[in-house]
Image (cartoon, grey):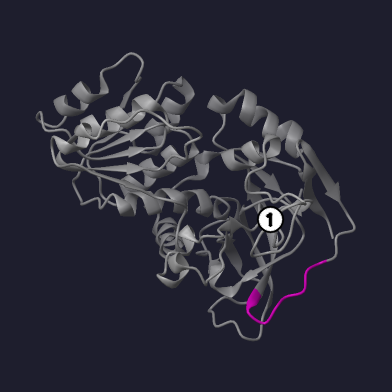
Amino acid sequence: MRALRYHGVKDLRVEHDIPEPKCGDDQIKVKPAFVGICGTDLHEYSSPTFIPSKESPHPVTGESMPITIGHEFSGTVLEIGSKVQTDVKVGDKVAVQPTVACFQCGACQDGFINCCDSAGFVGLSGGGGGLSDAVCVGGEFVFKLPPNIGLDVGALVEPLAVAWHAVDAAQIQKGDDALVLGAGPIGLGVIQCLKAQGANKIIVAEVAKERQNFAKHFGATHIFNPIQDDLVAKCKELTDGRGVQVSLDCAGVAASVKTACLAVRAQGRVVNVAIWEKEVPFNPNNLVFGEKKYSAVLGYQKKDYQGVIKALGEGSMQPEKMITSKIHIDRVVEDGFTPLINEKEKHVKILVDLSA
């Protein structure tokens, strides 16, 4: 079968002689339809972290490069293992949760497989990937899409589940006001999830004009440029001097941490969504004076996929405009990675169309 495989730094190859995987008793075989390219893919392309080296295979999959990539994907069901208990049927449109976990460590035993000591992702850590003609995944990780949702939108469920998980952790109540720092793909997802879960004012901090426009389309009520505007003052001005109930940091820069903490009211909640590449200065007094709460989120769980898919089916989330381009598997670097690196303000999600 066909698959796009990662052989090393900036070395992606479409191969046509990869053996089709056999469906295990507890697995579902999926024919991928659309695959999203995300920031993790861009990072791995130049500096592999999740992709296991030949010297250090992944502890769960046992695989190392070359591996098939693509972890944000939708598809149709080809086969269902004999031990899988599911309402999914052959031919159904589905979204796939690409979680790789050991199911044995303390975090897994406590039900937090997203925090597994050996965590990984299908499409990054082995176990196949979405950029192929077939992939087998655990039966519990395959979710049927509503009839009104296309397979292209189905490929957005994975990044939207990251956002849903973050908003759930923020404990948003209907009518709460929120600050979102950063309107990249995850930030835009957070805006949509806040709106779907009943947030009132959704204040967004973003520098890039195009991303500001996307934020407005997806439900931001107020948009500010953090370089030009005093975000803490703006948040208090919009909330009778108190500050927002929740801030969600999707930017991951030193200034955003301080702003996120200072912009929330007494007993407010700060949620870190970003992944950090280096240490930053942090003053705990920004939380202490106000008894504010700071928490962090990572990835998603099954309930987040279910929440997103339910919201899509009901129409409370309409993320179609996140898709800014569809490309061919033979042009992933030229038409996908390159524009996302060099023109990232113009794009949210570039999808690989495997039927093209």
Q: Quadrant of residue 85?
A: bottom right
Q: What element carries label 1?
A: loop
Which residue is drawn at the image coordinates 76% and 35% (left, top)? Answer: 10
The amino acid beneath tag 1 is Gly
- The image position of residue 5, as x and y in percent, is 78, 49
- Identity of the residue furthest to the right in this view: 17
Q: Is residue 76 left or right of residue 314?
A: right
22 magenta-colored: yes
Q: Is residue 21 left or right of residue 164?
A: right
119 magenta-colored: no
Question: Can residue 38 be seen here?
Answer: no
Please name whichever residue, 116 or 241, is drawn nearer the observer in this view of the structure. Answer: 116
Which residue is drawn at the image coordinates 31% and 31% (left, top)? Answer: 282
Q: In which quarter of the image is residue 338?
A: top right
Q: In this view, does 227 lie above or below 312?
A: above
- The image position of residue 56, as x and y in percent, is 71, 54
Instruction: Find disc 1 in the rendering and name its residue.
Output: 130
- For label 1, count other residues whose C-alpha is less than 10 Å away and answer few (under 14), some (14-19) or many (20+): many
Which residues are the magenta region? Answer: 20-27
- The image position of residue 145, as x and y in percent, is 53, 64
- The image position of residue 18, as x and y in percent, is 85, 60
Question: Can residue 229 be seen here?
Answer: yes
